[in-house]
């Protein structure tokens, strides 16, 4: 009997796979830095929801956060980290392999 | 907390929106450059008619160039610190833009190297190089306009390509110095105004989007 080796499908990074976090990662991968309000606008998420998803990405080390006060108002700026960029590229590659798209 | 899958936006669509908004956010600096270009060319045209102001025109041109750079830095700083801001770094983080800048840099280095070694003395090299750069710039902006669906970028690309054709046309009567200068300054003044108009259109769309986000 011939041995058939079945290639295991790639496992998607579930932290990035979540639609809201995927939107955040896609945005940050495209720009150098974006502030909280810009991300809220582009992802159409509520501020609370966005904050939670951003915290998860920051905790995972995929996104870095810079907080400062401008005119006595807090302002947070986010950037994708090298690890985050690598994870995002890997996610896109895995997704393409799973769906058969290049 | 998980988001409903009906909210799903394809990452490419999100990236395209981010890129589009980054272009919109650069409307104000573009408008400033356009106004400066038109003002400077207007000043040169006036100085050609009124020789008495020629010494002042040179000083004013230099001062305005410094002022324009300072103004750009100030706008950049103010925009970066304002709520709802996005930052791009000379667009070097994407492949095709890196390729474009790479081609331009290599081209500049090549021409400089050839000029340094005295390999060419043909007068057409300079204008030809300028035309190449303008064509590349124009083609790039038109490509981007289709990609991010931004009409104003198509206008900018058309401006670049138009300038390329005009520089070829102006090059054809470059033997007559005064007529060449006048034609060049008129072209630059018109281009500056056009550039300012495109910048204002971009900035208006950026302001509208920003206001919507901040109000939400």
Image (tube, rainbow, N blue to C red):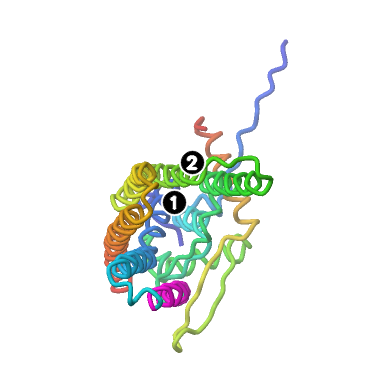
Between residue B27 and residue A61, name the one nearer to us: B27
Q: Is residue B66 magenta?
A: yes
What residue does disc 1 label?
A: B15
| Picture quadrant of residue A46 | bottom left
The residue located at (72%, 16%) in the rendering is A3
Q: Chain of mark 2?
A: B
The residue located at (48%, 41%) in the rendering is B124
The residue located at (66%, 47%) in the rendering is B113
Q: For marks 1 and 2, give the CA distance.
A: 41 Å
- Which is nearer the N-term, disc 1 or disc 2? 1
Magenta stretch, overall SS:
helix
Vertical side of A50 occupied by A98: above or below: above
Q: Residues within 10 Å of mark 1 (few under 14, many from 20)?
A: many
Vertical side of A18 occupied by A4: above or below: above
| Picture quadrant of residue B38 | bottom left
Residue A74 in picture, x, y percent from top left: 47, 82
Q: Using the image, tell me which numbered label, if any, was put on residue B124.
A: 2
Mark 1 against mark 2, which lies toward the viewer?
A: 2
| Element carrying mark 1 | helix
| Picture quadrant of residue A61 | bottom right
Vertical side of B182 occupied by B213: above or below: below
Q: Magenta segment range?
A: B56-74
Vertical side of A18 occupied by B129: above or below: above
Can residue B75 be seen in this snapshot?
no
Can residue B62 be seen in this snapshot?
yes
């Amino acid at each position: 009997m011939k041995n058939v080796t079945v290639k295991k499908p790639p496992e998607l990074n579930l932290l990035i796979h979540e639609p809201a976090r995927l939107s955040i990662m896609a945005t940050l991968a495209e720009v150098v830095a974006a502030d909280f309000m810009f991300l809220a606008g582009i992802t159409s998420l509520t501020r609370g929801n966005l904050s939670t998803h951003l915290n998860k990405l920051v905790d995972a080390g995929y996104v870095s956060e810079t907080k400062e006060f401008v005119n006595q108002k807090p302002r947070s700026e986010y950037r994708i980290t090298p690890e985050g960029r690598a994870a995002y590229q890997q996610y896109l590659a895995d997704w393409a392999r799973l769906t058969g798209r290049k | 907390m998980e988001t409903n899958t009906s909210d799903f936006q394809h990452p490419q669509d999100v990236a395209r929106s981010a890129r589009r908004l980054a272009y919109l956010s650069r409307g104000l600096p573009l408008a400033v450059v356009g106004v400066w270009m038109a003002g400077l060319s207007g000043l040169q045209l006036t100085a050609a008619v009124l020789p008495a102001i020629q010494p002042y025109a040179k000083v004013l041109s230099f001062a305005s160039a410094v002022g324009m750079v300072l103004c750009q830095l100030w706008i950049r700083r103010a925009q970066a610190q304002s709520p709802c801001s996005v930052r791009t770094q000379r667009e070097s983080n994407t492949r095709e833009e890196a390729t474009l800048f790479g081609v331009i840099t290599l081209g500049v280095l090549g021409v400089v190297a050839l000029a340094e070694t005295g390999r060419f003395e043909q007068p057409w090299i300079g204008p030809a190089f300028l035309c190449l750069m303008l064509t590349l710039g124009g083609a790039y902006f038109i490509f981007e306009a289709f990609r991010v669906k931004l009409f104003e970028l198509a206008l900018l690309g058309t401006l670049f390509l138009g300038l390329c054709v005009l520089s070829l046309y102006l090059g054809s009567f470059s033997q007559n110095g005064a007529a060449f200068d006048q034609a060049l300054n008129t072209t630059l003044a018109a281009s500056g105004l056009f550039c300012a108009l495109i910048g204002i259109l971009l900035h208006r769309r950026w302001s509208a989007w920003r206001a919507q986000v901040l109000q939400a």
